[in-house]
Amino acid sequence: MRTCDVAVVGGGIAGLAAAWRLRSLGQDCVLFEAARAVGGKMRSERRDGYLVEHGPNSFLGSAKVLWRIIESVGLQGEVLPARKPAWRYVYRDRRARRLPLDPVSLLTGDYLSARGKLRLLCEPLVPGGAKGNDTAWQFAERRLGREAARYLMTPFVSGVYAGDVHQLSARDAFPRLWNWEHAGGSVTVGALLAPPEPTDPEDAGLPTRRGMYSFREGLGALPRAIAQSLPTEAVRMGTPIASLESRDGGWLVSPHPTLALDKAPVFARAVVVALPSQPAAELLGQIAPRAAQALAAVQTVRVAVVHVGGQDPQDVAPRGFGVLIPPGEGQRALGILFPSSVFDDRAPPGHCLHTGFFGGACDPEAVDLPDDVLADLVVSARGSAFASSAQLPDPTFVHVVRWRQAIPQYGVGHRARMASLMHDVTAHWPGLALAGSHLEGVSVADSAASGVRAVDALLAAGHGPLEART
Ligand SMILES: Cc1cc2nc3c(=O)[nH]c(=O)nc-3n(C[C@H](O)[C@H](O)[C@H](O)COP(=O)(O)OP(=O)(O)OC[C@H]3O[C@@H](n4cnc5c(N)ncnc54)[C@H](O)[C@@H]3O)c2cc1C
């Protein structure tokens, strides 16, 4: 039987980051991925000259863990910064309004009424009142006023979580904002007084980068490059794991007997389960029912990602990053991104590519609409938001990706529940660790960081290299 130091279950960015960390620490690992390609949500493909992102479109330059991985797998030459200016818009009263990028546009923009802007500017004067059970709406209404809560916080919640602003927790979903109020009495004062975040010594030499980034061939380039940096025999694609069994001070990791391309089990001294919460709950159900219950209780939302491409002979496609659309504005799209405006080579020359998002916590049924209906909804929302884009010819390219478990929802108490879950797993199941977007944040960077931390926790607990077994 094949043995290894650590088995990683799940080949999304969380599992790949774990495998990368293990390899860079000289550990022998085997990664199991159910699909025939690695990356999970982070998948890009070129179709008819368009670059289609199945899930994430970009990552924040401040994400040091990703730069560490990018440098180590030799992908620096492929990095693409977002083009400037990366304008963002909010849709209000049947047109897009540019969000402020600097103090002048904060005052002059038409994204809020004069009264709404004045209320926003009063934020430092509003007494602090951070409560652990604040929803994102309660927090934003108190700090920024009702209008900014509606036109800034609500679409922001949709943009990051496809979530419901009345359900997500301010503390759990936006910990930095909440902590600033908690520590400083206001977000503004808290941000000004906040000490610099501690730098991981391993990040010391890395430059600080701002803005958003991708790669020439899309975000999927990173999972592919990580997988290629691992020994061929260490990556088993098309191999869903059906069971974990605690045995002889280690773990027997068994692929699904009928679905897996490679059905041979592996004996590992430790295991990182880097699966979304529902499949993680199913896998752990047999061995750790309490942990499985906590994972099964994590709410996730469904999202449809709708790519619409076509000619733009008059160069009238909107410029910038994209437009967020709050509920109640007469559109079903949660927002539309403009990939061909932000990154090079997302559409053939003279063409544009736009990506609409549907579903989420507030409109889950939208995910089930037929492809042509979803494409029409993107085109009509775009035409309403940007009058000039109504002149764009009908799209000639439509591609829809539907995620049944797209994004975990960080409701009130979510992080405390996940911390207690991880504590429980460490205490009762030595050699088992969890990673994934439901644990420490939903972004690509947070998911990768969770994989790295899972490995560090295992090694700190003494699950080092495995002695030779046959
Ligand atoms: C539409 C959308 C847009 C997004 N946009 C952004 C963005 O722009 N920027 C950003 O930072 N984040 C974004 N995110 C969030 C981010 O993409 C995800 O949170 C992150 O990629 C999750 O990574 P993961 O490894 O935790 O999970 P996943 O990517 O879901 O990977 C889990 C893997 O486990 C595999 N698997 C499942 N069951 C088994 C099994 N039994 N055995 C073996 N393998 C199994 C799956 O096939 C999958 O490959 C977006 C998410 C979505 C859905």
Image (cartoon, grey):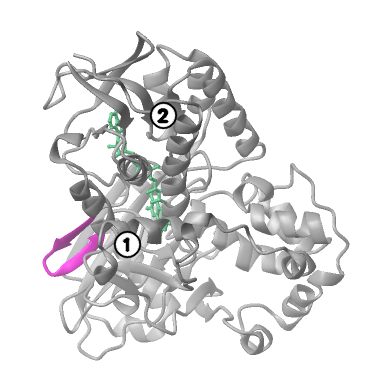
Range of magenta residues: 44-53
Residue in front for this viewpoint, 462 or 8: 462
Answer yes or no: disc 1 within 8 Å of ligand 1: no
Residue in front for this viewpoint, 109 or 286: 286
Where does residue 84 sit, x and y in percent of width and height?
Answer: 41, 84
Category of crowding for the residue at label 2, using alpha-carbon neighbours closer than 10 angstroms: few (below 14), some (14–19), many (at least 20): some
Image side of residue 191 versus residue 55, left or right? right
Tell me the quadrant of the picture where the C terminus can be found. top left
Element type where label 1 sits in the image: helix
Q: Tell whether position 309 is magenta.
A: no
Q: Residue furthest front?
A: 467
Where does residue 41 sit, x and y in percent of width and height?
Answer: 32, 48
Q: Where is 465 relative to 212, above or below?
A: above
Indicate which disc, 1 or 2, sits on the residue closer to the N terminus: 1
Q: Amino acid at mark 1?
A: Glu
Q: Amino acid at mark 2?
A: Gln
Answer yes or no: disc 2 within 8 Å of ligand 1: no
Where does residue 100 sit, x and y in percent of width and height?
Answer: 59, 81
Query: Which corner quadrant of the figure contains ligand 1?
Result: top left
Residue drawn at 33 percent across, 28 percent down: 6
Q: Where is 210 relative to 468, above or below?
A: below
Residue drawn at 42 percent across, 12 percent down: 287
Residue 22 visible in rendering: yes
**Mark 1 = which residue?**
71
The CA distance from mark 1 to mark 2 is 32 Å
Q: Main secondary structure of the magenta part?
A: strand
Pair 1/2: label in front: 1
**Mark 2 = which residue?**
278
Where does residue 421 sit, x and y in percent of width and height?
Answer: 56, 26
